[in-house]
Image (cartoon, rainbow, N blue to C red):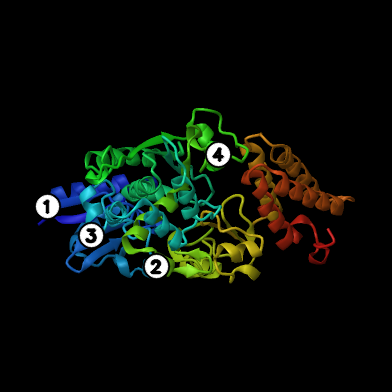
Amino acid sequence: MPVTVYVPRDSAALAVGADAVAAAIAAGAQAAGVDLQLVRNGSRGLFWLEPLVEVATETGRVAYGPVTPEDVPALFAAGFLQGGAHPLCQGPTDAIPFLQRQERLTFARMGLTDPLSLADYQAHAGFDGLRRALQLAPAEVVQQVLDSGLRGRGGAAFPAGIKWKTVAGLQAAQKYIVCNADEGDSGTYSDRMTMEGDPYMLIEGMAIAGIATGATEGYVYIRSEYPHAVATMTEAIARATAGGFLGDSVLGSGRRFVLHVRKAAGSYVCGEETAMLESLEGKRGIVRAKPPIPAVSGLFGKPSVINNVITFASVPLILARGADFYRDFGMGRSRGTLPIQLAGNVRFGGLVEKAFGVTLRELVFGYGGGTASGRPVKAVQVGGPLGAYVPESQWDVPLDYEAYAAIGAVVGHGGIVVHDDTVDMAQMARYAMEFCAIESCGKCTPCRIGSTRGVEVIDRIREGGARHAQQVHLLRDLCDTMVHGSLCAMGGMTPYPVLSALDHYPQDFGLAVADRQAA
């Protein structure tokens, strides 16, 4: 029997030398005359341990990491193929505390399987949800998604089932399922991990959406900066089609659903659904005015379901295990789990899937281990570059869409970026405005001009001077205009990081705490 060794093919692992490690292990096994099966799996999401090498033993997988090519000879000498002791040994993979304390539902297979193996996927409950969907009436499939409480994981948190029900109820010769995989938020990577490490999960979720709504064609819109995701998804779709899971008769049901990959043009604003549709149609990616909403008139003017990667990827489990199973996780109107991404100045960066209700303090310190620099944490940005900075006084607020909205913050796509006490929050506020000015599609004045003026006003605030308080007041007025006057979330949410920095860290703007409200 060959010994099975797993070395990730995830982009994060490749960036730190996973290919060289895999080659060194293969060469070492050949030199030792060992029958080796080398599997390039997805990442487990423990990025500080990448490349994380796993060995299948009689008692389960044993992990070693971070492994370099230079470590490989010593690993062979220590008997790592039998799970032998070595300074890089992390013990049984499933017993690593970072993994053991998670609730992995959507990411249950991540790192376990060969991403492109249909047999491997099915051996781990893959396509169970699709098979059940084909046994139900389309309206029953939609009802399962509604009953689960699943909300869009792309940031807006709109109930997924309502979108599906709207499209399902329309009569049209052609309908579309569109996956927005233009994951552009800083510190986020769960979409990329899904497409590279468990692509059939996304394919299955989109096929279920097609069956539920009567859509026969789908598109996955992937950002151009993700070449490995584009390649993996393209190959996975080809294999799924050849295996009968996509095509003119999905699993012999007579129901048609075909899927295509489209590479994005690299604009951040195409994360907004209507700008993405414009790009998909071969036009410049600028925001459309609504109504009509995309569910009624979306891609090529046809009814379209638009969700992000994690939303679609959550659906197979809901169909396979039932809406009640999924709804039992979470709190309030935030049901299920969220793949949370820890990044920035954090000791243990990586993916943590937890039920809604976990706190920022638990995530940053219980999982992330505090800052990588060893200095105190000053601010945590939640929800991407347009998300608010959350101060320590709010780190115990449960991660929940409504609870975060109540404090002027957003959960967003689940990206968390940690900053230590050396960060200048006035500079971070300026960066938010500058980012908006660069990435704005230019269609509406509050976003296009407001962000440019915002950079100028923050520069004057940082310089100080006699009119300092007036400039702070002007910045607040400008933010109010952007929030209420912008056409989409690009301009409407840029004030979130600016105002949160101004409210919670006034000293970085040259204001005394007592002067904060007066300004």
Counting from the top left corner in percent of width and height, residue 198 is at 33, 50
Q: How many marks?
A: 4
Residue 24 falls left or right of residue 265: left
Name the residue at the right extreme.
466
Q: Which mark is residue 274?
A: 4
- Label 3 belongs to which residue? 55
| Residue at 59% across, 49% down | 385
Give the residue at mark 1: 35
Q: Nearer the viewer, mark 1 or mark 4?
A: 4
Q: CA distance from mark 1 to mark 3?
A: 13 Å
Disc 1 marks which amino acid? Answer: Asp
Q: Residue at x 25, y 45 (%)?
A: 253
**Looking at the image, which residue sits at the far front?**
171
The residues bearing labels 1 and 2 have C-alpha atoms spaced at a distance of 45 Å
303 above or below 89? Answer: above
Mark 4 in CB contact with mark 3 (< 8 angstroms)? no
Left or right? Give the position of 266 relative to 109: right
Of circles 3 and 2, the one toward us is 2
For the N terminus, the quadrant is: bottom left
C-alpha separation, residue under disc 4 versus residue under disc 2: 32 Å
424 shown above or below 195 = below
The tag earlier along the polypeptide, 1 or 3, is 1
Residue identified by numbered label 2: 324
The residue type indicated by label 3 comes to: Val
Cα distance in 3D space between marks 1 and 4:
52 Å
Mark closer to the chain start, 3 or 2: 3
Residue 17 in view in this figure = no
Asked whether the residues under the numbered discs 1 and 2 touch, taking CB atoms below 8 Å apart as contact, a structural biologist would say: no
